[in-house]
Structures are given as structure tokens and as C-alpha cells.
Amino acid sequence: MTDRLGENTRALRLPVSPAPVGDPLRTPVHRSTTYAFATSQEYADVLNGTAAGYSYARIDNPTTDAFAHAVAAMEGAGLDHEVRGQAFASGMAAISTALLALTAAGSHVVAARSIYGNTYSLLDGLFRRFGVETDFVDITDLDAVRAALRPETRVVFAETLSNPTMTVSDIPQLARIAHEVGALLVVDSTFASPAVCRPLEHGADLVVHSATKYIGGHSDATGGVVVGRPELMAEVRSARVDLGPCLAADEAFLLLRGLETLPLRVARQCATAAEFAAAVAEHPAVERVDHPSLPAHPGHALAGKLFDQGRYGAVVTITPRGGREAGMAFADRLRVATIAASLGGTHTIVGHVGSTTHRQMSDEAIRAAGIGPAAVRFSIGLEDPQDLIADVLAALDGV
Ligand SMILES: *Cc1c(COP(=O)(O)O)cnc(C)c1O
């Protein structure tokens, strides 16, 4: 029969795999957007969720699912109840979908004033247009958080560690405060990663990540992930399927590979960051150094309670004396660290805060946010600590 088919039909009938493949050690990249069924009933059962299986790549993909499950296993490590994960095309796709799933016109959100710039503009712009109001507060001021709550508050949104001063959120207290009014605590844990802190273990309802940063860890894949209890994740999944920001299988493959070395990378990056911060903390050319490993950091004690032993994150902000120009010139003198956007990768990356992530703010506004105009943020990578320290000390000599 097959022999009599035309050449075009035959070209399309090549077997998926000419021999049984066995179990590959590494999760394969499943590029197929669609799946063949033996019967219409099987197809209907998969679509209805009454049988396990895959139908269409925007809905579910095996590589992407493997990645989401792996992150959920890490975030839920210390829990005695089940959690699920959903993967997204980017961190912002994860955040926007999670927030859309939890709110409706008339809902109210309380968010940290220091949150990631695009999360701020999402809530302050698009969400307001659709009738979701957000109050931005100093998230370390628990009375201010409590005072901002309303009967319509659905979500309290915080970050485990926030940019660029590495402010530590009191996740257990925020969860308690949110739950008192029936709101949910959503935590962006991108700067920490599950190798430093697992917010669900401290009472958060959903944890969101830009997997582009520490989870992927190699600056070569963009993605996001949301993890939480199955009931909440069913809502998040439904919103994701309707909105369509699915993670591509190729990206999921890279993120999964990154995840394998996350604890090793992050342990080393955190240790180097602490050594690096201590080496410059007392330097005469430095106005301040922000890293929770330093006993003078306001989040030091809280980080000691909430974070894994000896891990305080791997972002260090150094503020040399002087204004914006002094900060930019300091960054330009670095030879080991590279000026670039993003964080969490194997390379040490730096950015002058006042001309990049906080460029819309005046010097006064930057000072009011607790940052100096000369501040330079370091995302510590995997270079040898002594090389990074020699580099920063040489650059500080020019201040
Ligand atoms: C980068 C980042 C995001 C956004 O992630 P993308 O993958 O770039 O969409 C959100 N939150 C924090 C804290 C980030 O650092």
C-alpha cells in the first residue's frame, strides 16, 4: 500500500523513529507542535484531560513541562503538600499571567515600591487601564503594607530580594498580613533563586521567576516560571493557554540544563559575592556597599532566617563617592566584569544603576529610594574571586 503512494505523500510518511529509542538520559527537545492519535476518542480524551497526553504545543509540551516540574520540585522541596509549575516565554510573561489569573476589574494590589521596572509599569499602566488598582509601598514597612490593604485587595506582590539594594522581604509576615484580608502573597524570587530561598516554604502562595537569570544561568535562554498549589496553578494554566506566552521547547531544554547546576553555581556565586562585598566595604572611595551578607545591611538578620545557610544572593551594589559620572567612570574602568544588562549568569555583569534601570529618576528620587547616584550593580559570576576583587580595587583607585 505504502509503495503505491505518491512521492509527496511518501516524503511525509517517514517514521518518527525507525527503531525503539529507549529512555534518553537527557530530556529531548520536543519540537512537534501537534501529536498523532490512533482514534478520535483518544484525541478527545487528551483534550478533555481525562487521559494523559499532549495535543498542541501552546497548551502543553513535554520539554517545557519537564522544566516546569523540575523548578516546582526545587521550590516545593520542603513542603508536605503538592505544588505545580507552569513555564512561560519570559519572566514578564510569568508575572503578567499570574497577576491576570488572580485579579479582575475592581481588584486591588499592594506591591513593593522597589519592584522590577516592568512589573511596576505593568501594574501602574496596563492593569490600571483594566480596572486593577495598585498601591506601591515600602515593603519593609509592615505597618504601611497593612494600612494599604482594602477589602478588594487580591494580591500582595513582593520580591525576595530587590534591585539594587538587595532589600530582603519578610515573607512570613507579608503572608500573614495578606491572608488576614483573604489576599494572596505573590513573590518574585528571581534574585534569590530556589538555591537561596523558597518563598512557598515561608507562606507565599505563588512564586514567580525570570528563569532568564539564575535558573538558566548562562545568559542564553529567556523564560519564566510560576509555582504554587494545584488549585491556584489551574487558574494560572488556564490564563496561560488563553494568552499564549508558552515557553519554546528549545529554550526549555537550555533552562533545564541550567537548572542541573543551579545549586553549584549559586553557592559559589553567593560565596564570591560575600567575599567581594567584604573586600570593598571599608574602602575609602566607597560610600556604601549593599549585600545582605554584611552585618550592617538592614536585611542581614532576616536573610539569616529565611535563606539557606551562608547564601545571601550574588548581586552586590557598590556606591563610590561622587555623582552619576563617578559611577559610570568606575564601571568603565572594570576589566574583568563586563558592562551588560541582566544578571544571574556565569559572567560577572555590571551596570550603573542611575543611567540604566533607574534612568528615569532624578538624583533626589534616587537618593529617596535609598540608592546613591553613583551606584553600580554587580551580578557576581563564576570567575575566581581574587580576580574580581583585584579588578574592583583597581577601578576604585581611580575614584
Ligand atoms: C529580569 C527580571 C524580570 C523579567 O524577566 P524577563 O525574563 O526579562 O521577562 C522580572 N523580575 C525580576 C526581578 C527580574 O530581574
Image (cartoon, helix red, strand yellow):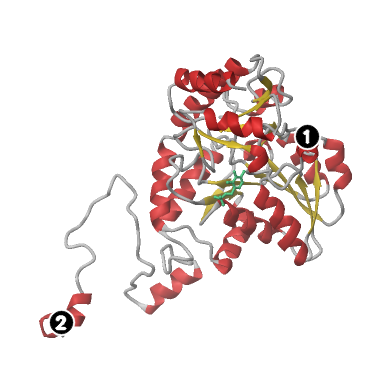
Q: Is mark 2 within 8 Å of ligand 1?
A: no
Residue 82, percent from left and from top: 56, 46
Q: Amino acid at mark 1?
A: Arg
Q: Amino acid at mark 2?
A: Glu
Residue 112, percent from left and from top: 75, 43
Residue 367: assigned label = 1
For marks 1 and 2, the one nearer the N-term is 2
Quadrant location of the N terminus in the rendered image: bottom left
Under circle 2, the secondary element is helix
Q: Mark 1 touching mark 2, by CB under 8 A?
A: no
| Left/right of residue 214 with respect to residue 148 in the rendered view | left
Q: Looking at the image, is mark 1 or mark 2 nearer the viewer?
A: 1
Q: Is residue 213 above or below residue 168?
A: below
Visible in this render: residue 369?
A: yes
Q: Nearer the viewer, residue 394 or 16?
A: 394
Residue 399 picture quarter: top right
Residue 187, percent from left and from top: 66, 44
Other-residue count near label 2 (Cα within 10 Å), few / some / many at <14 / 14–19 / ≥20: few
Residue at the spot 47% in from the left edge and 57% down from the top edge? 247
Q: Is residue 6 above or below residue 268?
A: below
Q: Nearer the viewer, residue 336 or 185?
A: 336
Under circle 1, the secondary element is helix
**Residue topped by disc 2:** 7
Q: Nearer the viewer, residue 113 or 334?
A: 334
